[in-house]
Image (tube, rainbow, N blue to C red):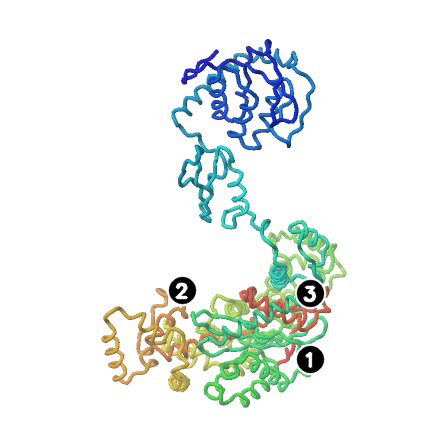
Amino acid sequence: MSVCSAGFVIPRAAAYHRRWKIKQIRDPYLRNQRVIDEGSSRLFLMEGAMLKSVLYLELAERGGEVAAAHVKEVIHQQLSATSRGHVILELSKWAGRPWAMGNEETLNLDDDYMTGDEMDMDEENQNEEQEEVDSLASTAENLVKGKRRRKRSQCWKTFRIIGSSKKNGVIISDVRCNYCNHTYSLDLRRSGTNTLLRHMRGCSQTPGSTPTGNRKLDMMVFREMIGLAIIEHDLPFSFVEYQRIREAFQYANSSIEFWSRNTAAADCLKIYEKEKLKLRKKLDEVPGRLCLTTDLWRSLTIEGYMCLTAHYIDSSWNLKAKILSFCAFPPPHTGAGIATKVLALLKEWGIKKRLFTITVDNASSNDNMQGILKRQLKKHLVCNGEFMHIRCNAHILNLIVQKGLEVIDEALEKIRESVKYVTVSESREQAFQTCVDTVGVESKAGLLLDVSTRWNSTHLMLERAIIYKEAFRHLSEVDASYQSCPSTTEWERAELIHEFLTPFAEMTNLISGSSYPTANLYFMQVWQIEMWLKSHEDHYDEVIRDMVIGMQEKFGKYWSEYSDILAIAAVFDPRLKFPMLEYCFNTLDASSSKSKIDHLHKKLKKLFDVYKKNPKKAAAGTSDSTVGQNILPGYDGFYAFISQTAGANGKSALDKYLDEPVLDMVAFKSMDILAYWRDNANRFKELSAMACDVLSIPITTVAAESSFSIGSRVLNKYRSSLLPSNVQALICARNWLRDFEEISVPIEFLDEDKGVKEGEEEV
């Protein structure tokens, strides 16, 4: 026997296993006859020490004689449905026959008494049972004193008890979710935490929940999501017909209705039209003018495509580039045909009166095209289109370097054939690797074959081939079929050419990348190229001198046509302004420096007068409401006085800006030019609008090149039957959703497998 703190005697169940006093009772809540032990029950094996203690107290109050109906009632009140099953199994063992608590359990009456093995095992564990009974008595004592049980359920990480009340003798707890603030009023002793756990799994705001399982599926929303995935991840329209994909959809939600590839294509077109309306609305809100780039491309299917891209600075002073059209453009690809198509696209997008510049490559048809555009749009262009035509800087560099490489064409061809010979088969690569190991070359860089129309790929090919020149020489000695090994003189000349082309490659990476997105730093890059050519005019090698002469001729042909707008863009950098231009011109030719500076002053003043006459075209941040928000409270009158004084002095915004000293280049090395003009828009007013337009000028057609790279993935040999309308929808919508992802990569080397550029001929 054991005595609890309440003073009740708790009989040990094991003592009664050998002297059962059995009688049958009929309980309306039970299915069949039950054999119940009137003296005791081994309830201390039930789960939960607190619940065991409660039942032991109930037994003790009645002197150890508890009817089956009362035990059942206590179990129903204290245990959840999950725990009852465990109790039923234990009571079945203790009483010697099955015990059921409801209609969901099965009853099988086989015998009336416990087996001998169970009785012997219970005697052996007698000491352990006594210890647990003592522990349960202690727990019962804590329960009487009102101590709480520690919360173990996972739901208490999400829920908290905010209050409780007693109704009809039952304690009702108010429990609130920490994430969605939904409140439940529950009898936690009877119902447990299942309701709270279900809420955790279905709550959309609870971390780790899966609310979609209880949400009704909207097929239109689901189809739109799949359409977005097809566009953004370059998936085929037949993706929705893949067997495994449909099985996965069916597993996720059995109510999904499958659709065909044609429906998927129609969904993508709807997304394209939807995003097009959004972009058109954004373009209407752009405060300044738009700069365009355009280029032609021929796909694997021999179809011609035109890409038209808009560059602008939005109302938040962020530089943006969006593809307006990637449309099929059948022959003839003449200047008149290109101009007609561009005009139609400008009218379609409603930007015909807002064009500032158009950047094109060196194709001869583009010269005719820009001339036609100037005549058609003359009254809408700034300064009658004087600054409209911008040549692609990267293509000009390509022409200049290609002209220089012509003088060493024989040596280049031998190196190119050597790389082809080694990389044509695996056996030759292994033989070449043996030569590399023999001569002791430790570089792990592999050989690269260039694209003859891309000089920077030729530079990379030379860089790699020079590393393995000794291996090539050894290969010519051991392999009689290798006949294209360059001579010692040709290798030396190739090394010299590589050294001279390195600055060009670095400049190309700068102007073709995204590190300097605005036009303010391009002037310095072009000036450095001219200085390089001038410094090598009198080189000791006659071949190099001839190369420089040819490159200077090309450089002079294009420099005068676009140097003005590049110089004006440099003036809008507060770290450069006119002092930088004076330095550059003086370094090149001091005698003509003053005349060039005066010429640029006149051009800048002429362009500024256009914006001064149209103050309504001011950039973002110059409105009266914005100015009023930025003025300190009580200083409105003082600001008006200062503004009137500045106007009385007769100084324009351009004069005030140029009179200010240049900023320290070292202190403002990482300066954001657009942020500077955004913060000073209220000071310079119409000048900030002019800076907004000039700084957005794209100096290369890298954006079009990037779209062609995307087009080669969309329209590949496995999807060559795509309609032009679908090609445009996929490429444009992808750009509108994700912007240019490859614009930071130098101009891609398009080859025969990826499609070729149209109009590569020189002007």
Whether residue 466 is visible to the viewer of this picture, yes or no, is no
**Residue at 51% in and 30% down:** 77
The residue that label 1 is drawn on is 330
- Give the secondary structure at mark 2: loop
**In front: label 1 or label 2:** 1
Earlier-in-chain disc, 2 versus 3: 3
Q: Position of residue 474 (x, y in %)?
A: 68, 57
Q: Give the camera-side residue of 538 and 747.
A: 747
Quadrant of the rendered image containing residue 616 = bottom left
Residue 263 numbered tag: 3
Asked if residue 143 is positioned above or below residue 236 in the image, the reply reads above
Q: Cβ–Cβ below 8 Å for labels 1 and 2?
A: no
Tell me the element at label 1: loop
Under circle 3, the secondary element is: helix
Label 3 to label 1: alpha-carbon separation: 28 Å
Q: Nearer the viewer, residue 363 or 430?
A: 363
